[in-house]
């Protein structure tokens, strides 16, 4: 079966992509900086070939990409900074092109249009432009907000989803939501059907909900309102930087226009917010 290299495989998106590819019976080569980590070991237990490499270092990627049919590419500016994200995304593209891979699926985000001023959306357009210039057979997947923001401790939901997002985005702005789990299933679909997905640039959402609606759905599921933790914007920015607060202010000032029909066409079982919360424990 054709080999797919998955970057970010120990993380949220890449992990979901790797698991769905393995379920489809694909060979998966999972990239990590630390093959001994618990997340890397779990992937190996599922049947992935776990390999060490650094997306910033092309020499470390060359042996990893050798013989690969496809590459799932995702970077995280929260870890590497915006310039680091762009450098890594371009480097993955360069080495994928050198290796002659037949399909790159890029985990992007945002509106797909320049000029928002949101650093981690603009950085992805810079990476995408480079991948296109290389002539790679490319699929771009563009989620906007992961439902994990409400449930995953790494995102500090009391501070972000239940305090600062409502404050900066507003309680009543409709937002396009998707789970990273479903992003993984959609990426696996893309690798399975290249004739349908190469050249596609897809805004993804499986539910459009305001934060007030999400709060009500959370309360319906767990029998109490989600706890907020008030933190001043300046303090959050001191810890996390200004990218997220810039994004949330942009979402307050600008409508998003994502039609979930496209996502359901690809993945009929994509989860709504209610379904996602039903699967979670308090
Ligand atoms: N949060 C949202 O609502 C949302 C919505 C849409 C899009 N996004 C986008 O999602 C992206 C982050 O994805 P995620 O949540 O899946 O990330 P994540 O869970 O933080 O995972 C990051 C992964 O990157 C790997 N990594 C980091 N630096 C690396 C390097 N130098 N070389 C090789 N691997 C490296 C890590 O692997 P090791 O540590 O094992 O090396 C890890 O597997 C961001 O670009 C963000 O803009 C987020």
Image (cartoon, helix red, strand yellow):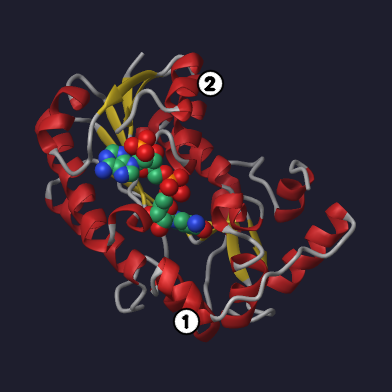
From what the image shows, is residue 203 above or below residue 236? above
Label 1 to label 2: alpha-carbon separation: 44 Å
Q: Is residue 214 left or right of residue 49?
A: right
Q: Residue at x 67, y 46 (%)?
A: 271
Residue 256 in view (yes/no): yes
In depth, the one of 36 and 78 nearer the eye is 36
Query: Where does the image place residue 57, in percent across and percent down from the top left?
Result: 14, 39
Give residue 154's mark: none
Instruction: Please name the residue that numbered disc 1 is placed on.
Output: 234
Q: Quadrant of residue 84?
A: bottom left
Q: Is mark 2 within 8 Å of ligand 1?
A: no
Query: Where does the image place residue 3, in percent across and percent down from the top left?
Result: 31, 20
Give the quadrant of the N terminus.
top left
From what the image shows, is residue 228 above or below residue 26? below
Query: Where does the image place residue 187, in percent across and percent down from the top left?
Result: 44, 38
Residue 142 in view (yes/no): no
Mark 1 or 2: the one toward you: 1
Label 1 crowd bin: few (<14), some (14–19), many (20+), radius 10 Å: few
In depth, the one of 25 and 79 nearer the eye is 79
Instruction: Please name the residue that numbered disc 2 is placed on.
Output: 23
């Amino acid at each position: 079966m054709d080999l797919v290299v998955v970057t970010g495989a120990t993380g949220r998106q890449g992990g979901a992509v790797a698991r769905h590819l393995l379920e489809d019976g694909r060979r998966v080569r999972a990239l990590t900086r630390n093959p001994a980590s618990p997340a890397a070991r779990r992937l190996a237990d599922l049947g992935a070939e776990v390999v060490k490499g650094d997306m910033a270092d092309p020499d470390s990627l060359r042996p990893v990409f050798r013989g690969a049919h496809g590459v799932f590419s995702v970077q995280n500016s929260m870890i590497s900074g915006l310039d680091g994200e762009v450098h890594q995304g371009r480097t993955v593209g360069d080495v994928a092109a050198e290796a002659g891979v037949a399909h790159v699926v890029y985990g992007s985000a945002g509106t797909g249009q320049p000029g928002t001023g949101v650093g981690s959306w603009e950085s992805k357009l810079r990476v995408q432009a480079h991948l296109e210039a290389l002539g790679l057979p490319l699929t771009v997947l563009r989620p906007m907000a992961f439902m994990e923001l409400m449930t995953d401790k790494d995102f500090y939901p009391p501070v972000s989803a239940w305090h600062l997002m409502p404050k900066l985005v507003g309680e009543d702005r409709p937002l396009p939501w998707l789970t990273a789990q479903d992003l993984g299933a959609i990426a696996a679909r893309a690798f399975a059907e290249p004739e349908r997905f190469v050249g596609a640039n897809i805004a993804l959402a499986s539910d459009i909900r305001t934060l007030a609606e999400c709060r009500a759905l959370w309360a319906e599921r767990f029998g109490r309102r989600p706890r907020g933790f008030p933190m001043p914007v300046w303090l959050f920015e001191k810890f996390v930087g200004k990218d997220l607060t810039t994004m949330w202010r942009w979402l307050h000032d600008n409508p998003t226009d994502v039609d979930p029909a496209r996502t359901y066409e690809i993945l009929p079982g994509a989860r709504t917010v209610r379904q996602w919360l039903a699967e979670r424990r308090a």
